[in-house]
Image: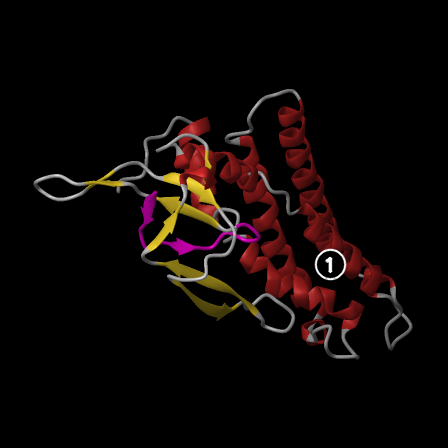
Amino acid sequence: MRRLRPVLLSVAALLAAGIAATAAKADGPTITPVSLHVTTPIPFGVNCGSFNILWTADFTGTNITFYDGVFLEDRWRIGEVGAGWQSLMMALQDEHSAGFSPHLDRLVERTESWAASPGPDDGAPIDKEDVRRRLIRAATDLEVAQLLEVRSTYMVSIGEVPVAEGPMGKLFSTEAVVRHAEALTAMVGPDALRSRLDPTALENGLIEHALRYSLGMTIYGGTSEIQRNIIGERLLGLPREPR
């Protein structure tokens, strides 16, 4: 049995707990490396809090779960004792390689649909050179993002780990969504800011959703700063950031 130290848990779908075993010594307890456990819901010693998420359509949120004084049986352990971080790193590697190009794809598709529709003067926005230029820039970045994601997928298929290549795809695709969500929303104008909850929203509110949702993409799955650190250290051989 191991005592669960208070931890902040933000793992969706799975109840995963970092366990630190303690060993009594004359000068106080010594904390051993973290082990990873997964278990069914615990009826006591758990406190839940909530916070709202800006980028959801109805501003609903998720939860933060704190554990204190909880005991778990060793049979729930994943991996070896003290090898919790190694187990977590497998999941984190997959997370760092997450592809976000489909969000940019939808944004480009919906903006093109708007641009091809006749305006009040019977002319379509896509007839304007500036509109076509902005759409071409977004479509070009979409192609690059998709190629980076395909490279990571191929590496996994041949048994290689995209340690830096995965973060490269995640970093590029998420920041491309931010850039083009801002640029295309500005191009469409104030009408693009109506959300899908508004029956008059352009393209069912998906342009507005892309703008609001894009900022969250640069945070979860590893922030853009974390991705840059991984790329710099693991691919370019740069020194670790001072702690």
Between 114 and 155, the one lying in front of the other is 155
> What residue type is disc 1 on?
Asp
* Res 169 quadrant in image: top right
Residue located beneath label 1 in the image: 130
SS under mark 1: helix
Q: Residue furthest left?
A: 26
Determine crowd level at label 1: few under 14, some 14-19, many 20+ residues with C-alpha closer than 10 A.
Answer: few
* Residue appearing at x 59%, y 56% in the figure: 178
Query: Whole-percent x and y of residue 233?
Result: 40, 31
Between 189 and 43, the one lying in front of the other is 43
* Res 197 quadrant in image: bottom right
Query: Whole-percent x and y of residue 196?
Result: 73, 72
Specify the segment rendered in magenta. 1-14
**Residue 8 painted magenta:** yes
Q: Quadrant of the C terminus?
A: top left
Q: Residue furthest right?
A: 122
Q: Residue furthest top?
A: 158
Query: Whole-percent x and y of residue 32?
Result: 27, 37
